[in-house]
């Protein structure tokens, strides 16, 4: 009579032990303050990722300086015309607008505290990168240059996001 109860009891005990076994630690996504190495035409920038509306609205505001070869990458949900301004931003910046394939379309100078928007000529901007003034010129980066989409994908995953969630045209998907 004890035999019919033995199998369910053993199975329940086994499942309990499995549930209590140490699990592979799940790492939390990196914060928006972390810099990620992403290159453009082979020249590496350390970039923070502005992915949420809140991060994009804040941008590089209220900073007195930014280290050499650093900046911020803004990744949007859809390609569209874009416009950036410099409210509460003290650092002179350059702005690069990129399309869905990661190709540099335009470069613009941004001036401290200038609240006049700097609009893209293109209707298809998906990515914008702000760097210290002169970075593109010093590194001989011109329109047509390509972002390293593999590095961007890795950086996104470290932020808990997937490249597939953005309309980026790449063979990495």
Image (cartoon, rainbow, N blue to C red):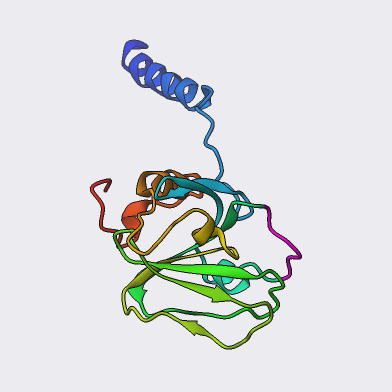
Q: How many marks?
A: 0
Quarter where residue 143 is shown = bottom left
Q: Nearer the viewer, residue 10 or 32?
A: 32
Q: Is residue 109 magenta?
A: no
Image side of residue 170 versus residue 142, left or right: left
Q: Nearer the viewer, residue 12 or 167?
A: 167
Identify the residue at horizontal 33%, vertical 78% (top origin). 122
Q: Is residue 64 magenta?
A: yes
| Secondary structure mainly formed by the magenta segment | loop
Image side of residue 110 versus residue 126, left or right: right
92 in relation to 21, above or below: below
Residue 23 visible, this orientation: yes
Identify the residue at horizontal 57%, vertical 47% (top origin). 30
Where residue 10 sits: x, y (%)? Answer: 40, 16
Residue 49 visible, this orientation: no
Identify the residue at horizontal 37%, vertical 81% (top origin). 121
Chain part drawn in magenta: 62-67
Q: Nearer the viewer, residue 45 or 171?
A: 45
């Amino acid at each position: 009579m004890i035999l019919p109860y033995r199998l369910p009891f053993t199975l329940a005990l086994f499942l309990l032990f499995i549930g209590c076994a140490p699990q592979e630690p799940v790492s939390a996504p990196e914060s928006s303050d972390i810099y990620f190495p992403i290159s453009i035409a082979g020249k590496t920038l350390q970039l923070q990722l502005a992915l949420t509306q809140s991060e994009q609205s804040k941008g590089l505001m209220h900073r007195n300086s930014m280290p050499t070869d650093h900046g911020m990458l803004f990744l949007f949900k859809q390609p569209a015309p874009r416009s950036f301004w410099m409210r509460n931003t003290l650092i002179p910046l350059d702005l690069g607008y990129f399309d869905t394939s990661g190709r540099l379309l335009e470069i613009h100078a941004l001036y401290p505290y200038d609240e006049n928007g700097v609009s893209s000529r293109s209707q298809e901007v998906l990515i914008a990168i702000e760097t210290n003034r002169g970075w593109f010129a010093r590194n001989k980066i011109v329109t047509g240059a390509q972002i390293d989409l593999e590095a961007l994908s890795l950086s996104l995953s470290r932020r808990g996001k997937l490249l597939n969630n953005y309309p980026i045209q790449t063979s990495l998907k």
